[in-house]
Each structure stands twice: as C-alpha cells, then as structure tokens.
Amino acid sequence: MTTLLAIETSTEACSVAIWRDGEVLERFEIAPRQHAMLLLPWCEDMLAEAGVAKSQLDAIAVGRGPGAFTGVRLAIAAAQGMALGLDRPLLPVSTLAALALGPSLEHTLAEGQKIMAAIDARMGEVYAACYESRANDELIALGDETLAAPDVLALPAAEGWIGVGTGFAASDGELRQRMGSQLIECREAALPRAAAVARLGARDFAAGLAVAPERVEPAYLRNKVALTLVEQQAARAAKDVAR
C-alpha cells in the first residue's frame, strides 16, 4: 500500500490531500494570502482525519510550479522540511500537469484527449503547457512549459482541445479568443488541486521517480526569487511538525 501526503499552493487555492492506495482525501479552499497560515495545520488535520501517522507516509508529493512565487516556494519549503524530518523522499509534480489532470478527476477522458493548461502569471503573461490523455488517467506532455503573453503564446495545432485554468481568462480572455473553435470546452476558473498532485505523485512513486528533498527545485519560469522570511519560518515549522 502506498501512502502519500500531497500539497499544492501555487495559485490562490490552498490544497492538501492524502493518497492511500488509490483512495484520496482532500481539503481545498480558495484562500489568497492565507497559505502560510493554513498549510501546516491542514497537513496535520488531514493526516488525523485519514487516520495516517506521519511515520506511515512513503513520500510527500508537492506542486513545484510554475505559479505564484511565494506559493510555489512555500509548498516546496514545507514539503522539504517535512520530508527531511521524516527521512522520506519527495515527488515534485508540475502544477500545470496537475491542472490538466483536473477534468479526469470528475469523469473519464477519452484516450487521446488534448488538454491545454494555462495559469494567469500576472504582469500580462500566462504559464501554459499542452498534454494528451492516455489510459488510466495518464498524461503525456506535448512540449515544454512556457511563459508568454496570451497574444503571442504559440498555439497548439488542430481542433478538439479542452482548455483549463485562469490563463484563459487573463488579459480579457485573449487566449480563449485566439483558440476559438479549437476549444471544445474551457474551464477558465479551474485551479490545480492536491488530489491531482497526489495522483500524479503516486504514478511517479510507482515508477521509482521519488527524489531526495534537497534535489527539488521550484519551477518559476521567471528569474528565481529569494526565500522570504515567512517561507523560512514555514520550513522550520514543518521540520518540527514532522518530529
């Protein structure tokens, strides 16, 4: 049985999930600027609700961005602190991949379904990546994660895309308008969730892709920013929680 703790704070949503051999328990809330206050207590609460002791965790899955600098750094700092305290590995998961997996958490996607995930990066830009679904909710990346203004972002070819994420509402919906009839569905309010991070993390754990905590780096796509005092405190607190 594989047991994971998963956290995702790369956007305005704060989310924590427990994965136990295919079963997922999740807490999710849109909570701008409250992530540092909520994250560690939620981790404790979710473990207690699931009846999972910290010592029973096999690994910790974390949304590694791209997304808001502070949110991405907070999630990784907290995950690293807990993993080091527990002597467990980390499973870094693309926030865009977690966002793209969102629709399949609600219903089964047809194999070969194309999904474009886009997150509002502020400053007139979006983070974006394209994926294709496979059997058993597998996702195949169709290129690199990118950062660009919606009006110059390179668009995927062909029709039949599902668009997910706040990037489709950014700049007055420029990206959604550009894709037009290429989209068969667009969920511009969708945000990445820890349940998807857990599912992708479990797949990576089974494939032997867990890594040492110190090897995990945030995916900013913009220039790297310094660790803030709040995030340093979160990392220290996470180590204390893990003990």
Image (tube, rainbow, N blue to C red):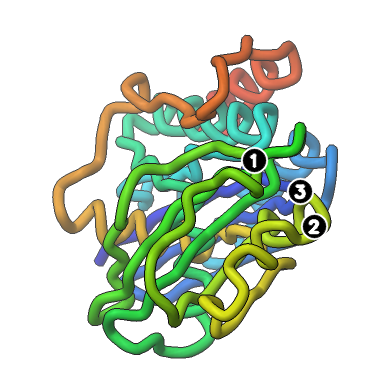
Q: Amino acid at mark 3?
A: Glu
Q: Which residue is mark 2?
A: 30
Mark 2 residue element? strand
Residue 71: give its label. none
User: How much space separates mark 1 and mark 2, taking CA atoms?
Assistant: 25 Å
User: How much space separates mark 3 and mark 1, taking CA atoms?
Assistant: 20 Å
Q: Amino acid at mark 1?
A: Ala
> In the picture, residue 4 is in which quadrant?
bottom left
Q: Which residue is mark 3?
A: 12
Q: As displayed, is residue 108 above or below residue 151?
A: below
Mark 3 residue element? loop
Earlier residue among tags 1 and 2: 2
Earlier residue among tags 3 and 2: 3
Q: Amino acid at mark 2?
A: Ile
Image-based side of 23 in relation to 135, left or right: right
What residue sits 20% from the left and 44% below the top? 209
What residue sits 53% from the left and 28% below the top? 220
Q: Which residue is mark 1?
A: 149
Image-based side of 197 in relation to 171, left or right: left
Which of discs 1 and 2 lies nearer the camera? The answer is 1
> In the picture, residue 23 is in which quadrant?
bottom left
Quick check: marks 3 and 2 in contact, CB under 8 Å?
Answer: yes
Label 3 crowd (10 A; few <14 / some 14-19 / many >=20): some
How far across and down, in percent of the image, does residue 229 sit? Answer: 73, 12
User: How much space separates mark 3 and mark 2, taking CA atoms?
Assistant: 6 Å
Label 1 crowd (10 A; few <14 / some 14-19 / many >=20): many
How far across and down, in percent of the image, does residue 59 sit? Answer: 34, 45
Quick check: marks 1 and 2 in contact, CB under 8 Å?
Answer: no
Quick check: marks 3 and 1 in contact, CB under 8 Å?
Answer: no
Q: Is residue 99 visible?
A: yes
The N terminus - image quarter: bottom left
